[in-house]
Image: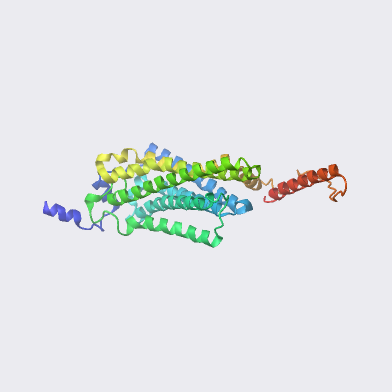
């Protein structure tokens, strides 16, 4: 028994990936099966769609000046995290199945680190959005007055935290020196690290949900007060619409990622008794779908974002060469009548029409 204990607690840096998979009885297919090919084909297809969809969100925020506010910069960074997740999933698909046994430990750690970084960056970004909304909503502002420099520093901090959390397992918190602590889902990871990581993310989920619930209740209360003043109704409605979009994004993220985190938590607590390998692949696919959800949410809930998407697609299809070709010609007589009240009202209506058409034409010129 003493010899077994010493063997278990000694470091095994010279062993390959297959050794750790055999240790926890996680099967590695020797040949490609039809199921492997189908899963990889679907996975790569979804990954490409995820990358293209989130790239379009980032381009939309970049080209449309109406999105040049801190909250949209953070949502753009969220899209960047989802795009990174698409890259991580594509890398996983290309290095799974029979190829797993040919990976070096460094390649295996990189494969897992990419997914860890994307999740951590997404969670940290959602937390930053919650903080930004908390700062603005309780003063009933639509956008915060955070400077671009602070937003850039915040985004850099988000990715720094994600990279650190992704590197932790490969640098020191693994099971290479304690084989009894090896995970069945990720055989080189420490079960204690999985418990820490899952609990940290789940706790962050609950904190953000409680924060958004408090903010949403406050916004509804303030909107009821503002409804008595017609001049404030539009502003309150804009705040509520933006809060609904962010709340849906948070809800979709929690729904998609919670099963996977609970699976990791059970694997960390129970080990092989959790049978986590039986359903961890389904949880991973469910989590991958979240990276595709956000662009769909923006398209369905945000009219301005949807118009920008259409403009980008029209430009890519070559239909944006002459944005003014469909704009009607208006002849405007702008001098202001001095005496007649009815003429003055007609003049005001005319000016509003001019401004409306100018705004439409300027938006089309983005293409």
What x and y, as percent, mark residue 329? Answer: 81, 45
What x and y, as percent, mark residue 275? Answer: 28, 39
Report the side of 271 relative to 142 (left or right): left
What x and y, as percent, mark residue 5? Answer: 15, 53
**Residue 64 makes an appearance in the image:** no
Vertically, is 119 above or below 297? below
Q: Nearer the viewer, residue 14 or 33?
A: 14
Give the quarter of the image for residue 35.
top left
Q: Residue placed farthest to the right in the image?
A: 339
**Residue 207 makes an appearance in the image:** yes
Report the side of 191 relative to 316 (left or right): left
Q: Nearer the viewer, residue 206 or 306?
A: 206
Q: Nearer the viewer, residue 266 or 137?
A: 137
What x and y, as percent, mark residue 348? Answer: 79, 46
What residue is drawn where x is 45% and y is 49%?
A: 85
Q: Nearer the viewer, residue 341 or 317?
A: 341
Report the side of 67 relative to 96 (left or right): right
The mark tally for this picture is 0
**Please, which colouring scheme is shown?**
rainbow
What residue is drawn where x is 57% and y is 42%?
A: 225
């Amino acid at each position: 028994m003493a010899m077994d204990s010493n063997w278990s607690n000694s470091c095994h840096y010279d062993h390959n990936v297959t050794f750790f998979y055999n240790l926890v009885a996680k099967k590695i297919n020797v040949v490609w099966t039809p199921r492997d090919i189908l899963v990889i084909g679907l996975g790569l297809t979804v990954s490409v769609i995820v990358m293209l969809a989130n790239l379009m969100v980032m381009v939309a925020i970049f080209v449309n000046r109406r999105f040049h506010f801190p909250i949209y910069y953070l949502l753009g960074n969220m899209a960047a995290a989802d795009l990174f997740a698409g890259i991580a999933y594509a890398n996983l698909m290309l290095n799974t199945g029979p190829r797993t046994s040919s990976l070096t430990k460094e390649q295996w750690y990189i494969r897992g680190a990419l997914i860890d970084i994307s999740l951590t960056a997404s969670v940290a970004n959602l937390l930053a959005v919650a903080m930004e909304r908390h700062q603005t909503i309780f003063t009933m502002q639509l956008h915060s007055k955070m400077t671009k420099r602070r937003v850039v520093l915040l985004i850099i901090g988000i990715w720094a935290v994600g990279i650190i959390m992704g590197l932790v397992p490969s640098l020191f918190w693994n099971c290479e020196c304690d084989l009894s602590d090896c995970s069945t889902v990720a055989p080189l990871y420490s079960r204690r690290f999985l418990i820490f990581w899952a609990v940290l993310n789940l706790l962050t989920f609950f904190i953000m949900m409680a924060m958004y619930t408090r903010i949403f209740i406050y916004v509804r209360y303030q909107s009821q007060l503002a409804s008595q003043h017609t001049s404030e109704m539009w502003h309150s409605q804009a705040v509520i619409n933006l809060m609904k979009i962010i709340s849906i994004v948070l809800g979709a993220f929690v729904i998609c990622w919670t099963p996977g985190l609970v699976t990791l938590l059970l694997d960390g607590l129970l080990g092989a008794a959790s049978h986590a390998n039986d359903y961890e692949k389904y949880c991973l696919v469910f989590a991958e779908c979240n990276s595709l959800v956000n662009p769909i949410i923006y398209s369905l809930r945000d009219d301005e974002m949807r118009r920008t998407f259409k403009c980008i697609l029209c430009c890519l299809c070559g239909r944006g060469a002459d944005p003014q070709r469909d704009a009607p010609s208006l002849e405007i007589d702008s001098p202001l009548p001095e005496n007649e009240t009815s003429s003055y009202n007609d003049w005001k209506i005319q000016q509003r029409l001019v401004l409306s058409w100018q705004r439409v034409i300027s938006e089309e010129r983005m293409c």
